[in-house]
Amino acid sequence: MTDFVVPLLAGADVWVGKPLRPRDRDEWASALGAASLPDVNFWRLRRAQLLTAQPELPDPDVDELSLWIGLHNLLVFEHPDRARVWAREITWRRLEGATRTLLTLPSPEDTPTLVARHLSVGAFIDLLRAEVIVATPIGEVRLPALESGRRFLRGASGPGREQSVPWLPQPHAPEVERLIEDALRSSPLTCLLRPTLAPGGWSPLLAAELLLQRPWARAVCHAWATQKDWMLTGGAVMSALLPSLPRLGGSPPPAGTLDSGTRPALPEAGAPLALPGAVVPCDPQALGAIVGALIHLHLLKVLELDTRVGLALGSREPGVLAFLALPLLLPHLSSELGEPVPAVAQDATSAPVVRRWTEYVDHLAELVPRSVVENLLATLVGRIVKPA
């Protein structure tokens, strides 16, 4: 198994062998431990240090071994030579069922386990596939960069070239399409870092405890900021969060609430949800950590001069609009979350930042529909800020 895990974590060429089953996991479980897997633990640590300087990681356990085997089997279904393997359809269905069992893991109980899950799943979704591109009279043909592709290349009329392409966005075998969601669901941190890939039913609250720790909150915010379309990233997080927010008070706040600083009422029993979807219980600290991180993402993009918010308003997605509305809630949230640029830290060097941030928030107030802000006042603010 280390022949698969080590190159996966190290970013090297991953070679796929025969399908593995739960009984293989049971046989290998006795070999788990930091002392018995030095190469695996070295690359686990190196990969975790890409996120934060001093990560805390547990020793590999049976759940992580199950995850490795499940990810290996996902690539078995994608192997270019699969058609040459004689097997009945029922055999592949049984393998799919066994792989789903391996990928169905209990929710991580602490931050180290959250991180350990992400190391493998994060490396998996970043895999590249080597292809040979062959020119033919009817156009270009893409083939796997294996011996079968090279045989075709030798018979082609023109030269070919090799290219690496991201594996995840490519078309997949039906089994892989069904199982990728199970792989992503096993790693809430991967979904938090790449929320646009998260399966249905995921919620950022599943990894909120990690955002309560400053080094990890910083790592997550900067990972969001590196995404090409950061507004969709923030919108995906909010879309997954909104179903867990029952309406407070049963009706929107009266006109003028946005400027008055009054706090919404407590939730009424049986109040409708903001959006249909997965409902994950939350506490004020966890919710505040998520909202604070999303507002910090706004600040990072202001610092980068990369805020082109007018483009996002072409989308009427509730999650994107809710994400863009978050900075407008700061007058109500600052007592709990603080200010993006604290007053005590403001000096001559920070004045340009304060000015750009103020201009950005004013611009958002002109673009974001007022109803979106009022809905967040009725569903979100009162769950973070205690009523007076």
Image: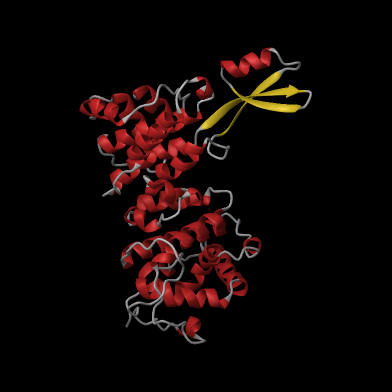
Q: Position of residue 356 (x, y in %)?
A: 58, 65
Q: Tell me if 54 is positioned left or right of 125 in this view.
A: left
Q: Position of residue 382 (x, y in %)?
A: 37, 76
Give the quarter of the image for residue 141.
top right
Q: Is residue 211 visible?
A: no
Give the quarter of the image for residue 274.
bottom left
Q: Is residue 376 visible?
A: yes
* Image quarter (top left, top right, bottom left or bottom right) of the C terminus: bottom left
Classify 115 as above or below 316.
Answer: above
Residue sitting at 48 percent across and 20 percent down? Answer: 85
Count of labels shown?
0
Q: Nearer the viewer, residue 6 or 107?
A: 107
Residue sitting at 60 percent across and 57 percent down? Answer: 305
Classify 370 as above or below 226.
Answer: below
* Image quarter (top left, top right, bottom left or bottom right) of the N terminus: top left
Residue sitting at 45 percent across and 49 percent down? Answer: 193
Q: Tell me if 218 is positioned left or right of 162 in this view.
A: left
Classify 335 as above or below 100.
Answer: below
Q: Position of residue 316 (x, y in %)?
A: 60, 66
Q: Position of residue 121 (x, y in %)?
A: 41, 39
